[in-house]
Image (cartoon, rainbow, N blue to C red):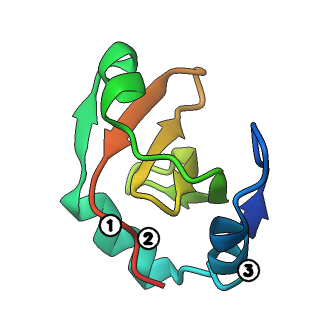
Amino acid sequence: MEKTAIYEPQETGRPYIETACRRFKPSEKNILKWLRKTREVTSENFNEEATTTECYAEGYLTTRDGQRLNWTIDMGGSGFVKTPEGKYIYLVGPDIDF
């Protein structure tokens, strides 16, 4: 995990989200559990289906074949993984436990 509890409001601030975001520090176990419950969607469907709170965590994972994949996951249960080639894999799933 590289960064947690990052809050970047796009519109006017939402105090209840900002408060929850301060506590948003998912563990590696929480992230892996969430990844197993997600499903991949297209970028178009991601915009329609994603629940975004403007509070997210960033990090990376290493695959069994040694690839490093960067991820960004929103507290609301949506996120994406970026491959070394620059491809984005869009994911939606449940809220993240933390």
* Badge 3 density bin: few <14, some 14–19, many ≥20, Cα 10 Å: few
Element class at badge 3: helix
- Marks 3/1: CA–CA distance: 20 Å
Residue 54's spot in the image, x, y percent? 65, 50
Q: Which residue is mark 2?
A: 31
Tell which of 77 and 87 is nearer to you.
77
> Visible in this render: residue 81?
yes
2 vs 3, front mark: 3
In the image: residue 43, left or right of residue 15: left
- Marks 2/3: CA–CA distance: 17 Å
- State whether residue 71 is above or below residue 32: above
Residue at image coords 71%, 78%: 19
Quarter of the view holding residue 90: top left
Residue 83's spot in the image, x, y percent? 53, 32
Q: Which numbered disc flags the more N-terminal residue, 2 or 3? A: 3
Q: Which mark is residue 22?
A: 3
> Visible in this render: residue 2?
no
In the image: residue 5, left or right of residue 45: right
* Badge 2 density bin: few <14, some 14–19, many ≥20, Cα 10 Å: some
In the image: residue 57, left or right of residue 51: right
